[in-house]
Every structure is written in structure tokens, then in C-alpha cells.
Image (cartoon, helix red, strand yellow):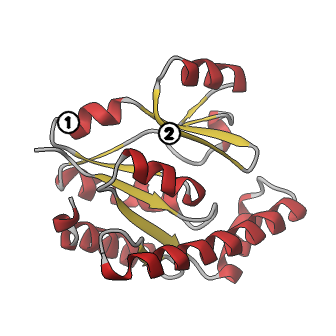
Amino acid sequence: MQGRLIYLMGPSGAGKDSLLQAARESLQAFGCRLARRVITRSAESQGEDALGVTVNEFERLERAGAFALSWRANGLAYGIPREVDDWLAAGHDVLVNGSRAHLTAARQRYPNLLAILLRVDEGVLRQRLLARGRETPEQIEQRLVRNRRLQEQSVGFQAQGSNDGCFAPLLLENSGPLSQTVVRLLQLIESNRQCA
């Protein structure tokens, strides 16, 4: 039986990496594998379990067909290794840290994917971005503007998917305690198995 791609997305600073770390063992107990992203940013500055590569190396891997999915955002390139297709074919669910802007392309490749949108209050998001110290204040404001634009698009996805709960991204709030978000993530995955 084919596994299901679970596509977690949300703005930078929403806490996707913290959520994945906190939920790792529970997800594995569900039989869900976590894909490790490849990013054109040094491993030390990522804050996630990802492989940092140079732009040239990323482009070489992309040309060689090493990625099931790849995209560009905020001046970086991101790739999901092709091994996720092997895991899916073996019947495993696979959770990937995806991009809101790339959701349409991801759904074309994986029509039955389960999209989960991690949301956070904009004030909380601004504080988190400032606290991690990766971007200038101007870059943070650009991220917040991008977040607002993509948030509006996600509302459009929900409107389109109003007659098909498996199409619309499921909303997962992460402005409160992380432990609550982990519980809710697992509930969303379990309660939407019929979308596979």
C-alpha cells in the first residue's frame, strides 16, 4: 500500500523545526518517516536537521535528479531527496518540511498529499525572527510581507477545497505551547488518514 506525503508548511520562524524535533519520536511510532532537506545554507546556521550545501552543489544535485521536490525562497534553494519516493512506495508515510509557494507543484507530483499549514500570530512571528538573529530587520519585514501574501493564498486554497477536505490545507496553530501543537499535529495526521 502506497504511503502518504505529509506536507508541513508555514512561515520561517513559525516553529516548524522545533515542532519536527519535538514530534520526531511520536511520528516514528506512527510509522512516519521524516525527510531531511538539502539547503543552500551552512549547517551551523540552519537550526534544523538539514544538509547544507553550496549553490553549485545544489544545482549539480538538482540536474542529476537527486530531488523529489525542489524550490527557491528567500534567496535560498531547498530540496527534498528522491529517497522519499522509495519510502512512499514501501508504504511509509513521509513528512516533509515544504514551502507554501511550492504547494501547487508538490500537489501535482503527489496528488493525495496531506497539506498542513503551521500558523502563528504575526507579533509572535516577528519576535521569533528577531530572536534567532539570522536576518536584518529589513529582511524580517520582507518575510512578514511574504507571509501575509501567502496567508491570503492559503485562504484561497481553503475556499477552493471547501467541498474536498483532503485538498484544503489543514490549519495548525503554533502561537501557544509546543506540546499542544505536537498533540494537534498527531491528531490531524490520524484523523485524515482517509485522504491517503
Total numbered labels placed on residues in the image: 2
Image quarter hosting the C terminus: bottom left
Q: Label 1 crowding class (10 Å Cα cut-off): few <14, some 14-19, many 20+? A: some
Residue 180 figure quarter: bottom left
Give percent across and percent down for residue 159. Answer: 46, 82
Q: Where's residue 68, x and y in %?
A: 43, 35
Residue highlighted by disc 1: 89
For residue 190, side relative to residue 130 (left or right): left
The answer to whether residue 4 is seen in the rendering is yes
Q: Residue at x 15, y 42 (%)?
A: 91
Q: Distance between the residues labelled 1 and 2?
A: 19 Å
Counting from the top left corner in percent of width and height, residue 84 is at: 33, 36
The first of marks 1 and 2 along the sequence is 2
Q: Is residue 12 above or below residue 61?
A: below
Callout 2 secondary element? loop
Q: What residue type is labelled 2?
A: Arg
To which quarter of the image does residue 85 belong? top left
Which residue is found at the position 18% from the left and 49% from the top? Answer: 31
